[in-house]
Amino acid sequence: MYNIDNSGNPYPYITPKEGAAMKTAGLASAAALCVGAVIFVLCTLQAQAKGPLQHIQSFAIYYAEPSEQALAALKKTGLAIIEPQLYTPQQVAGLQEAGTLPAAYLSVMESPSWNETRMGRLQPGDYLLQGGERTHFAAWDSYLMDLRQASYRQVLLDEIGAAAEKGFTAVFLDTVGDIDEYVQEPALREEQRRSYVAFLREVKARFPGVFLIQNRGFDSLAASAPYLQGFLWEDWRGEWRQDEWSAKQVELVRRYQRKGLAVFAVSSRSEPKDAREAGRLRFVHLETPSGYDTLK
């Protein structure tokens, strides 16, 4: 049966019962669409999980003595990477009260000669030998270490413990990238990487509430990411799109960023493109053209 509209065109006649059924079906379809949209949003939010450090919008790296001026500047940042041996528990508490997260510096793969406390505890076997020789970095007067040695890992754990006693709840894991860059033999490199992950497990077992921030070490990130809350890209450059290696690392880091990893980037130069590109990737950026012993 058909009706005729105002233009003389026929259209099907719909009974009141059929109309009610169609209305019910339409509402059901709309509800299904709404539910689907909600599920999509929830899945998106889950895919872009927020990590415990992703709220931080600024940071500083400062390894010199904590003068009053330096402490005042550090209190204006969200994260302060500092040398724990130079700070008192009161100074650490003061930073935390100001809303700053103090992160204790820890050199993982290198032992610097200035750290007399550590150097006095090292065993001969703690140094990584390559070709029967120790690897010495003259620029920093430091030595490449062997993470396979339980005695050396214990030294590192004790340094974290000393920092924790002062109130530090975050640790900055420096020189991890040495595994990629300075361990020459592939088999030995992989042994160091496995030992590094074992060390991270030890840290989490002994200090379950500590936040860990890794500096570089891109080839280790897949294995270490489950234990990390932050990642620092030292020597960041805004020209990453023009460099195949850098583009690959950006893809890698962003994969874990979406899972909650906070990403920080530091440039040793004043180049607007560095900050601009970091911002586009939601990396928290810092310029340090004068090094790590001064603050702007």
Image (cartoon, grey):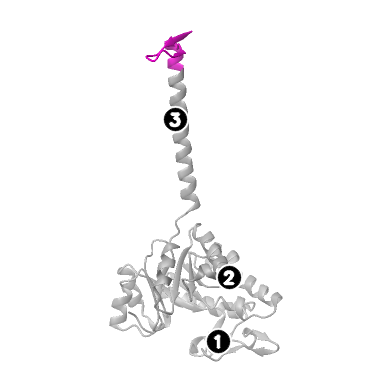
The mark closer to the camera, 2 or 1, is 2
Image quadrant assignment for residue 275: bottom left
Asked whether residue 53 is in view, the answer is no
Where is mark 3, residue-wise? 30
Which comes before the other along the chain, label 2 or label 1? Answer: 1
Mark 2 crowdedness (10 Å alpha carbons): few <14, some 14-19, many ≥20 = few
Q: Position of residue 188 (x, y in %)?
A: 69, 77
Task: Measure how far apart labels 3 and 2 are at the Cα level.
Answer: 47 Å
Where is mark 1, residue-wise? 121
Q: Is residue 150 left or right of residue 102?
A: right
Q: In this view, does 100 lie to the left or right of 134?
A: left
**Residue flagged by tag 3: what amino acid is it?**
Ala
Mark 3 crowdedness (10 Å alpha carbons): few <14, some 14-19, many ≥20 = few
Which residue is rendered at x = 45% and y = 59% of the image? 51
Asked whether residue 31 is in view, the answer is yes
User: Can you tell which mark lies on residue 245?
Assistant: 2
Q: Position of residue 15 (x, y in %)?
A: 44, 10
Residue 209 lies, with reference to residue 90, above or below; the image says above
Which residue is rendered at x = 36% and y = 83% of the image? 294
Image quadrant assignment for residue 55: bottom left
- Any magenta on residue 71? no
**Magenta stretch, residue numbers:** 1-21
Quadrant where the C terminus sits is: bottom left
Residue 133 lies, with reference to residue 219, above or below; the image says below
Task: In this rendered view, identify the residue nearer to me: 16 or 220.
Answer: 16
Q: Position of residue 226 (x, y in %)?
A: 55, 62
